[in-house]
Amino acid sequence: IVVYASTDRFRQNRKKSFRGHNNAGQAIDVDISPDGQFVVSGDSGGYVCFWDWKTCKMWHKIKADEGPVVRVAWHPQESSKLVTAGLEGTIKYWD
């Protein structure tokens, strides 16, 4: 995952790169926690990956589904809650 600045021109922020997940052949979603502390992404291997926004280091990786996890979304007010959706139609609410 790479980050771009959107000020006057779109430019890649070379200091912000989040690595460690697999997205081969899938459109995988990314979201940022409501408090701005974490980045979360699905994975084509069925994992959900969490990174620290400031350090860009992977914080945690959990197995969420048997197939690809293509959608992730934080709860808008509570950063401890997350929804994931798998390619096969499985939707999970994590607390």
Image (cartoon, grey):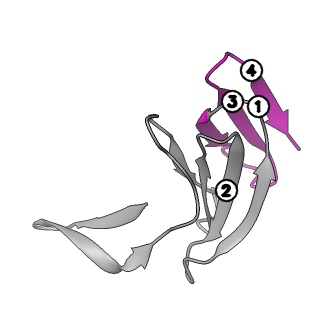
Q: Which residues are magenta?
A: 69-95
User: Element type at marker 1?
Assistant: loop
Mark 4 or mark 2, which has the lower sequence index? Answer: 2
Q: Which residue is mark 4?
A: 90
Circle 1 sits on which residue? 66
Q: In this picture, is 42 found above or below 1?
A: above
Could you give the CA–CA distance between mark 2 and mark 1, rounded to whole angstroms?
A: 15 Å
Q: Nearer the viewer, residue 47 or 40?
A: 47
- Asked if marks 4 and 3 touch (Cβ < 8 Å), the reply is yes
| Residue that badge 2 annotates | 49
Amino acid under disc 1: Glu
Front label number (3 vs 2): 3
Q: Earlier in the sequence, mark 2 or mark 1?
A: 2
Q: Earlier in the sequence, mark 3 or mark 2?
A: 2
Kind of residue at badge 2: Cys
**Which mark's residue is nearer the viewer, 4 or 3?**
3
Q: Nearer the viewer, residue 67 or 52?
A: 67
Going by the numbered disc 3, the residue's amino acid type is: Gly
Q: Earlier in the sequence, mark 1 or mark 4?
A: 1
